[in-house]
Amino acid sequence: MRSWTTFKTDTMNITDSSAANETIIGTYINDSIRTVCNLQGGKLRFLERTMELKTVANREAYQIPNKFRKVMDVYVTVGDTDSNTNTIYMPEMVFDPTKWKLILAYKLGTNDYPYFAYVQNQEIRFQPIPSSNDNTITLRGRLNVRDLSIEDYSTGTVTSVPKAVTLTAVVSAGDTSATLNAVWDLPTGVYTMFFDSGEQRLVTLTNAATTCTWDDAVTEAATASTTVGTEEGGSILTASGTTFTQDMVGRYIRITETTAANGGDGFWYEIGEYISATVIALTKPYTGTAISAGSAAFTIGQMSPIPEAYDISVVYRSAALYWRDKGSNEKANHFWRLYDGGNEAGFSKEYGGVIGQMLANEGETEEGSYIPPFGGNSATIMQAPYYFPYQQASGFNP
């Protein structure tokens, strides 16, 4: 993935690396990110996100988060978080203002079971109006793409990830509580505890206490060593010499990959929660080798939503715009073709280049069938005519 800093560096390397060029290159980059994200009307899967709100009794309208450009779908979960006992209701999305006025005229009153939902003035409205507090509203929408502007941050080192704890005794089958060997040093709350038996539970941990409780009894014994993640299951990362801030939530962190012990895995992870100046939480579990008492280098970067396989398109388009404005059509055309095969510049009616690859891959609703290559010139199965390594130059195959 390319961060704001990497986008600028890569683009300036193929245009003009002078400091005076940095501002205009930044403008090209943000324009290109928005252009890519608006292809096909912005109906790209990588722009889809979900977010949860809570109902308030007798409140009809709820603010749509700024991160959403468009709400695509909504459902309301009535009951607790237990998927075996709660009920999911899927209100009909109404897009016609006249139909919505007719619905209001019916005066459906209040009810926890929504029949209709309507988007108006950046709010989503429900009929009937919710009658209870704290039912979960789940919105699915497309991202509202923001300009990038924040440079990479790499001060300090990662000392541990994921967070490990030790229990004072082995957990036995049927247990719903345990005691930590030391006080919990993070805020009181609900976390996910991963036992070495393979089980995991939502546990309540109390700051400055050794208390550890959960509702659903474990079915297998577990040893004293466990790891703890956020309530959603993301890993907790601790660093030294850093000044993490709340506004880093939503950016990505990469622990530098090395062959030495306590090195990172080189992948980018989204930061999902700020805990303190030295502790943050990831949105996903860390899949590299656990780091304990380490001093691993890291980088935090502000990213575009474009997947890593296609974000080079932003560099190519930015370079094309730069050389076009400089009057170098030959160089501009080179980068237009790398970007989208020349479609935007008018060279081709079809998409090619990196954008052609992106639209072909992102447009698939499911993985296509695999067509194996021929195993030899005696193959008898029907296969793709464009893949025949034993075809002779004459077109005849004995």
Image (cartoon, rainbow, N blue to C red):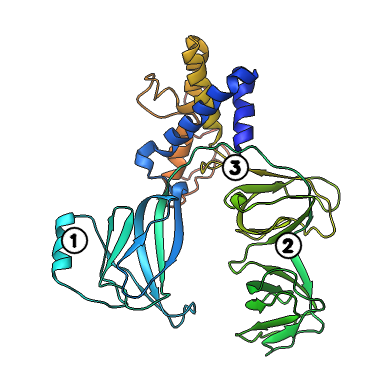
Residue 344 spot, x, y in % from top left: 39, 24
Q: Amino acid at mark 2?
A: Pro
Residue 276 spot, x, y in % from top left: 69, 59
Residue 396 spot, x, y in % from top left: 47, 27
> Residue 107 vs residue 265: left or right?
left
Q: Label 1 crowding class (10 Å Cα cut-off): few <14, some 14-19, many 20+?
A: some
> Residue 118 vs residue 191: left or right?
left
Q: Residue at x 70, y 69 (%)?
A: 228
Q: Label 3 crowding class (10 Å Cα cut-off): few <14, some 14-19, many 20+?
A: many
**Disc 3 + disc 2, Cβ < 8 Å:** no
Vertical arrangement, residue 294 with respect to residue 325, above or below: below
Q: Is tag 3's residue or tag 2's residue first in the polypeptide sequence?
A: 2
Can residue 223 be seen by looking at this rendering?
A: yes
Q: Give the foreground label among 1 and 2.
A: 1
Q: Give the foreground label among 3 and 2.
A: 3
Q: Residue at x 32, y 70 (%)?
A: 59
Q: Which residue is mark 3?
A: 302
Can residue 392 be seen by looking at this rendering?
A: no
Q: Which residue is mark 2?
A: 162
Q: Which residue is mark 1?
A: 100
Which quadrant does the N terminus fall into?
top right
Residue 158 spot, x, y in % from top left: 78, 52
Q: Amino acid at mark 3?
A: Gln
Q: Amino acid at mark 1?
A: Trp
- Front-most of residues 356 and 118: 118
Vertical arrangement, residue 34 with respect to residue 277, above or below: above
Furthest residue toward bottom: 174
Q: Which mark is residue 281?
A: none
**Badge 3 element:** loop
Q: Residue at x 47, y 47 (%)?
A: 46
Could you give the CA–CA distance between mark 3 and mark 2, rounded to whole angstroms? Answer: 22 Å
